[in-house]
Amino acid sequence: MRLWSVVFFLVIKSVFYLHTQEIVTAERYLAMVSERYGGMRDYEARIVIRSGNTAMSGTVIHLVPSFMRIDFTSPANQVIVFNGEQLTIYLPEYQAVLNQSVSSNRGASGTSLATAQGLTLLRRNYVPVFVTSPTPEPLDSGASEKAVKLRLTRRSLSEGFREIIMSVNPDTKLIRRIEGRTIDERLVRFDFSNVKINQGIPEQRFIYDSPASANMYNNFLFRDTD
């Protein structure tokens, strides 16, 4: 009789414990990541972009709401700058500067997703599930670094990525990696490391002075009709 009383007590205690714990769904976890980025004014990070056999690396800086700049070390001296209204790309190999007027909500890249604004769009346009569970798992097979992994599937055919795998640092709730599968089945990966938050980055950092010798090409992608 005493044994059954102990068992009954343990069962009741376990049930009570489970009811007092918050059940973290994938949607809630993504919201937590979004809230984390919502508290940032700016950040700087090391970025590596991989697509097929091509890899590029450099430093990315972001300032709310939509300023973004990448200064590449590979390819050396290549620059991408977005000031919320205009996208500028400098290609030193061709001595060319490409300018394009764009709206901040036109499409999404891996870098733009790693912002509060991008995460808001992501939550609206994609359905999240955990790849396995809320429990952190190795970032790569056999790696000591761990991350919580989310699989996001697009709600509509208009999204640029069919599917996104987002790996999040479980301690900081910062995005460690974004892997996107494009509509043409191409895999693109963005790795973020050495993230520094709220460094006081000024808007002047997003003003790009083109080399005098570079050729200018405007509206090279499309005419912005938004």
Image: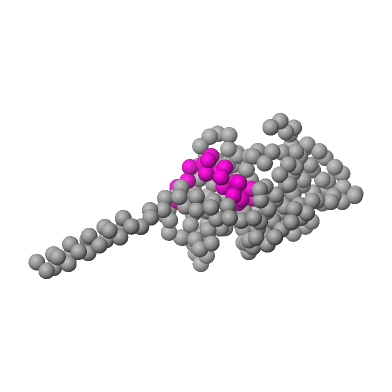
Reply above or below: 169 against 117: below
In-image side of 29 versus 42 (left or right) = left
Q: Quadrant of residue 199?
A: bottom right
Q: Residue at x 67, y 41 (%)?
A: 104
In-image side of 12 versus 72 (left or right) = left
Main SS class of the magenta portion in the image:
helix
Q: Is residue 47 at all visible to an observer of this figure?
A: no
Q: Furthest-top residue in view?
A: 225
Q: Furthest-bottom residue in view?
A: 2
Percent x, y of residue 221: 74, 37
Query: Which quarter of the figure is the C terminus placed in?
Result: top right
Percent x, y of residue 27: 46, 47
113 inside magenta stretch? yes
Q: Furthest-right residue in view?
A: 213
Q: Residue at x 65, y 60 (%)?
A: 198
Q: Is residue 104 at all visible to an observer of this figure?
A: yes
Q: Residue at x 77, y 47 (%)?
A: 89
Percent x, y of residue 116: 59, 49
Reply above or below: 4 against 185: below
> Start and end of the magenta stretch?
110-131
In-image side of 140 versus 190 (left or right) = left
Instruction: Say which of 68 and 108 sits in front.
Output: 68
Q: Quadrant of residue 219?
A: top right
Q: Residue at x 64, y 63 (%)?
A: 196
Instruction: Say which of 105 and 158 sits in front.
Output: 105
Percent x, y of residue 30: 50, 50
Query: Which quarter of the figure is the N terminus placed in?
Result: bottom left
Protein image colouring: one colour
Instruction: Say which of 121 and 175 sits in front.
Output: 121
Q: Quadrant of residue 176?
A: bottom right
Reply above or below: 159 against 33: above
